[in-house]
Amino acid sequence: MRRVLRGCGMIALFSSLVFPAALYAQSDTFAALDQFDSTGGRLDLRLRAVQRRVIIDKQPIDTLVYETCKINWARRNATINSPALPSKCSTNLYGGPRLKLEQGDVLRIQLVNDLPKLHYDKSETLPAALDIDEPTNIHTHGLVVRPYAPHDRVSTDPANGAFGDYPFVTVMPKGGCGPGGGHIHHLATADTRCRVVDYEIRVPGRPGESSVEQGQHPSGIFWLHPHFHGLAKEQVSGGMTAMVNIGRLRDYACMSPRADGTCDTSVPLPPMRHMLLKDIQLVSLASGSHPAVALFDQDAGFCSKTAAQANAGSYCRGGEADAGRWYFTINGAVHPTWSIDGGRAEVWRIQNASANVTYDLRLDGAGWDGQSDAGGMPFQILSLDGVGLGLVNNGANPGQSHFSPRGLQRRAILMPGSRMEIVVAHRPRAECPADGTEPTLDNCSTAPAPTDTPIALVNHEYETGPGADVWPRLELARMTIRQSPTPAMTSLALATNQRTPAGQTVALSHAAAGQSHINSSTQSLCRSGNVRPLAPGERRRIYFGIAVDEHVDGKPDKAQDPADPNWKPESFVLGTSIIDAEGVERDPANENPLPDGPLLQTMNMSDAKADLCIPFGARERWELVNVSPEVHNFHIHQNRFTVALNPDKTPALRTQDQRDAVNLPQVVVNVGEDRQVLHDTIIVPRGAGECKTTVGPGGQFAKLDDGTMAGDNRYRLNPGAACRGNKAADDKSGSIDVRIDFNRPEQVGRYVFHCHILEHEDLGMMASIRVLSRDQIEGP
Ligand SMILES: [Cu+2]
């Protein structure tokens, strides 16, 4: 596969430097994210995408970051090249900024693309070293806000040329804007801009109001990252991310709930610590005046499995002759350590900002072994993927127990793009039940630290599938609780206002949607004749597949030598179909039956058609079906969904390996309650080993036509394949069913859903969706 390097003068890539034998990199002190608060309902920022020299573990590295500054919006174009005032700009460039918003705020971002040319290593797939102009754009992950391009909203504000949360824009750097400059054919999108583009993102609701039932925006943790198709992985790997916080922790968590369910706000919440988890692979360390060289086309096998297991520190050695390092950082700091006073707890707000890595997070200490399979010290999860879990309110006994018995977990899997908020307190093993009994907030209590007690945040090894990626085992950070005679803080109760609406339908006209004008290039395939709500009993099926073309010697192998002229890359493909009430699978475009199997394809952003056309107000059930033996991470923009339940209230999923679904039964679904957590990303459990990725006779797929890596690769899933996604008992596919409503005004428009493992997304595991208001379907 192509290889993208940064910081290359032509120094020797694989130097023979000898590393110190120390297990750990020297621990850093905890680095806070640079915080930018909205004021008066606005936050006006300039995000300059640049390459800057940053320091990671004393290594100077040239990497990609956002230089973030507060600006005077009216003078944004006049000041675009002015030196930024340090007092208004971010300083922890690699760690990233944190944007703090309220419901009702308007976030305005002037995105400036000052990225250098992208350098492809000539040793790999391309015939010669190639420098190309690098486009970018942004996406606000998890925000339910409007997805418009300026031409989509002319009727409401003709003077406004800003984009909403819209991934179909190409922002070229200055050098790529000339005639013929920077044209990347297969990545072209409908909207191409030169160097500067404005975004205006309005968060629904009013300050302090975060009720999903009321159509307000949930409070919680979200994030911002580049979403340019084909380059998202490279740019996120470099470090181009920001945390976005909306509302306050108090909107869904309370230290002291009263019997009537209200919160005594005089009791303070514990201190909060924000953590952006980022990783970077150095193929060569700094030497003399040369900075370290980072590999942004991340290699999951960078560290050998045994080397990774042997290393408990927050980097592992890898690359050619183990001459490189793969650092796992928190806000840019390597293995940060800090201490808190005894009797205290902290809330950790953790964001997986890695392009590809899946974290299996546990706590180590106080008699618990976070590196064991049994899991570590129990912690309380307050929110997952930006929405409070709502575990509070034992209505039968108000005032006695405010905590769900399912309030504690000993591990949490965060796939790329996922966030969670946890309460970390000292819970000695002796205070909690023996192994095999689920720890709860009632039976696993906190206790004062007897001495200075360390609690480590560790990452357990996680394998995405047999022969697929294995993410290394590492210790990420360490907190010491100082000895104190004061009793330990217990836990937080959660407010109940962020759960699934019980079921409401909102009528919507184009006026409410704010979009009477549809870009003609995308309208043609979504019109009255083919946009209808699903009938009762119907559901959509979304396929996630990996197709590997046959090698000339008949051995499909993802690790083939790219120098081999017969080398073909993997294709990450996604397909959709409709399953009717009789169980017949139909083509979503024309509703014809699909006896030859569904079509799966890589996304081609230059094709402006929408893969799915859905009427506003639709309430759908989607089967997410994994016909590959590797997990994926489903993410949909501008929307949230719940996990569908079986009649016995268990999650509707099939999996070959229960650890794929570790979050699901215990955390994601509050089994036994009527209401469920809303998600923007969810794991799609892997298929069995029989779900081969092969193309050709006897394989999973039949190829329809030749294409390029990012082009129009199309495959049919063979009817005789072992993995077909059907519910037959012998089916080997992995799957999880979700329920998605398209009933908020912010969901009208064109956007995408995809796998959030960015390597998979960039290589095509993505599709576009268009949600139309009634007026748009019926026409003028
Ligand atoms: Cu994937």
Image (cartoon, rainbow, N blue to C red):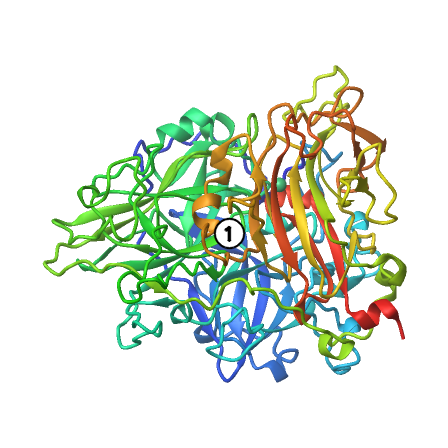
In-image side of 578 versus 481 (left or right): right
Total numbered badges shown on the rendered structure:
1
Residue that appears at 30% across and 68% down: 269
**Foreground residue, 133 or 141?**
141
In-image side of 234 versus 134 (left or right): left
Which residue in the protein does label 1 denote?
Answer: 418
Residue 422, relative to residue 685: is it above or below?
below
Q: What element carries label 1?
A: loop
Residue that appears at 84% across and 33% down: 595
Q: Where is residue 10 in the image (x, y as percent from the top left)?
A: 59, 39
Residue that appears at 43% across and 75% down: 87
Which residue extends farthest top?
Answer: 553
For disc 1, the neighbor class at 10 Å (few under 14, some 14 to 19, many from 20) is many
Q: Position of residue 216 (x, y in %)?
A: 55, 73
* Placement of the C terminus among the 4 image quadrants: bottom right
The answer to whether residue 131 of the structure is visible from this angle is no
Q: Where is residue 281 in the image (x, y as percent from the top left)?
A: 50, 40
Q: Position of residue 251 (x, y in %)?
A: 42, 71
The answer to whether residue 698 of the structure is visible from this angle is yes
Q: Which amino acid does label 1 sit on?
A: Ser
In-image side of 206 versus 429 (left or right): right
* Placement of the N terminus among the 4 image quadrants: top right
Which quarter holds ligand 1? top right
Name the quadrant containing residue 776.
bottom right
Residue that appears at 52% across and 80% down: 206
Name the quadrant containing residue 638.
bottom right
**Foreground residue, 667 or 247?**
667
